[in-house]
Image (cartoon, helix red, strand yellow):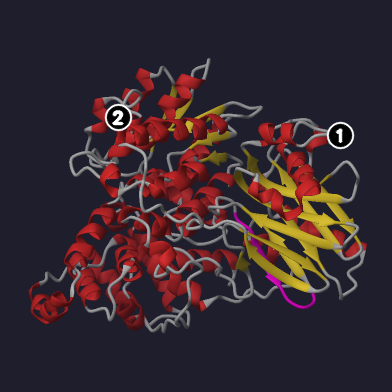
Amino acid sequence: MCGISGILSFSSGLKVNYLQDVIQRQTKQLSHRGPDAEGYFIEDGIAMGHRRLSIIDLHNEANQPLFDSTGRYVIVFNGEIYNYQTLKQEIKGYPWQTTSDTEVILAAYQKWGADCLKFLNGMYAFAIWDRTKKELFIARDRLGVKPFYYNYNAKKFIFASEIRAILATGMVAKELNSEAIIDILSFQAAKTPRSIVSGIQQLPPGCCALLNKAGFSIKQYWSIVEKKPSSTFNLSFAETIEKTKLLFTEAVKSRMVADVPVSAFLSGGIDSSAIVGVMAGLSTQPIETYSIVFKEKKFDESKYARIIAEKYKTKHTELLLSPSKLLDELPAFFSSMDSPTTDGINTYIVSKLVAQAGGKVALSGLGGDELFGGYQGFKRHQQFNEWANPQLKTLSKLIIPLLPKNRQGNKIVDLISANQWNLSTFYNNSRAIFLQKEIKNLGLESKCQLPWLNLRDSKVTNYPLLSQYSIAELTNYTLDVLLKDTDQMSMASALEIREPFFDYHLIEFLLSVPDKFKYNPKISKSLLVKALCDVIPLEIINRPKKGFTFPWSNWLKTDLSDFCKEHINSLSKRDIFDKKVLFGLLTDFEKSKNGILWLHIWALVTIEAYLIKNNL
């Protein structure tokens, strides 16, 4: 896990001395991502920089930028290739200089060109410069676990792991992207391929690109809906359970490969418990586990985490988090926020805990809910498809006046008033913080933006209902909020997080599984529970679902109240929102009126804190 940066120009005649200054400014902004080493590659017209967090092959020879054996190709790479050892055996005759996974990418590119991506299993964002052809090849992993930001015009191409490293060049204006503001209010983060800064975009997941004098072309090399679901799933339930267990175990095993100790986040939920249980069975040493605890019993899961820690004799560490502790951390948290989202402080706190204890790598249960139907949205989507019919359209005018004036009622009104009912309509309604009419009340007008993956496409709707919702989650909320938070907040403490549930082999298989094998109204994530029943205790399986969240509603009305008021007041002075509506939202939240929740307020506070910190 590292930080990458670069600048390339075919026409502006950027000289070495100038490039050296620019790339050093860029890479300095990424120092938190890689405290172990830094390096640069600079030639006329191009510069690439790297900050390294040493995980695999700790020797200096594996530092980056790294050249292939011929000296023709040079790479900067952020991430891990989990199957690099297997892939290395398939590349015959290459004179290996290191034992790193980075060199395996170079050797694979030398052998197969862009087709090397078909063979890589991992999380990655990298750039390879061909010194002979004078062209740059870039790629991002299939699910978008690792970020790749860029700015491109006819004169130059700038890229980096973080937005701030692109802004550090001084070549991109700090201009706020108003559409990204609407994204944050609607869905908690800027949606791919947009970013918070106009002119800076995200390379979509599963995409690669080639840049040369002829121009810049993006190609999708993998899609989450690439493999058409079979009309006849030919595995029995028992066989499905067995294959799920096998694929999940392999995903965990491959993510335990490192030249440093590998620990795990442990909330006491099904997902993290399954990971720790499998890890313990694969390791000869006790696993180090970490969890956050609260005084507020409604949110505290420590007793469940302890059950797993005791069962598998882990080296377990707990961090008691109070509102005062959180308030103390907020300045550092917002300083760490490269791209504003509303959900990152959870990961920031636990990552800092692990890093302070000396950890460099931790496994996370992120993705389990999305793949196995753990959210309530999955159940609601099934129900929606059962009652969404023409007759309901007729009855909607009678239903609307009967609905409660709370958040749930507001969302139902918004949904049944829609012109069309489909997966996209339902999902966007389900995940929305501010509804479109509420955004208009704030003084913003949303333009129609085509999503990078169209949820109305038959490639999506041909999947089973639960898988359709999984696809929606993985390509929206998970990609733009959870994975973004995981990367930026863990790397703020130079911690690498690996997510076994994001193994693409596991995902491709689970999306093909029929709903009847996935859903059991009495058991949450029943397929995962069945597959891992030998490692997950009954106390964990039967426990009430909480989810890893903080007591935000209480805190924003008490200890964090002044902080929120200060930022809302500051935000009101910008020429973005209707001031009266802003203050009205804060009042409604304090009085628990009109369905205004803490997340509405925190989204606005987060935007203002980010704008202040980054001078946008």
Residue at point 37%, 37% (across, down): 271
* Residue type (three-letter) at the residue carrying disc 2: Tyr
Q: Quadrant of the N terminus?
A: top right
The secondary structure type at the circle numbered 2 is helix
The residue wearing badge 2 is 304
Q: Quadrant of residue 129?
A: bottom right
* Residue type (three-letter) at the residue carrying disc 1: Pro
Residue 254, position in %: x, y? 57, 32
Crowd rating for badge 1 (residues with CA inside 10 Å; few <14, some 14–19, many 20+): few
Residue 54, position in %: x, y? 70, 35
Q: Quadrant of residue 298?
A: top left
Residue 585 belongs to the span the image colors magenta: no
Residue 493, position in %: x, y? 58, 42
Question: Going by the image, does 514 lie left or right of 604?
Answer: left
The residue wearing badge 1 is 95
- Which tag, 2 or 1, sits closer to the chain's start? 1
Compared with 21, 275 (above or below) is above
Residue at point 70%, 52% (across, down): 115
Question: Going by the image, does 4 lie left or right of 557?
Answer: right
Tell us which disc is closer to us: 2 or 1: 1
Write the start and end of the magenta stretch as one range: 147-155
Residue 150 belongs to the span the image colors magenta: yes
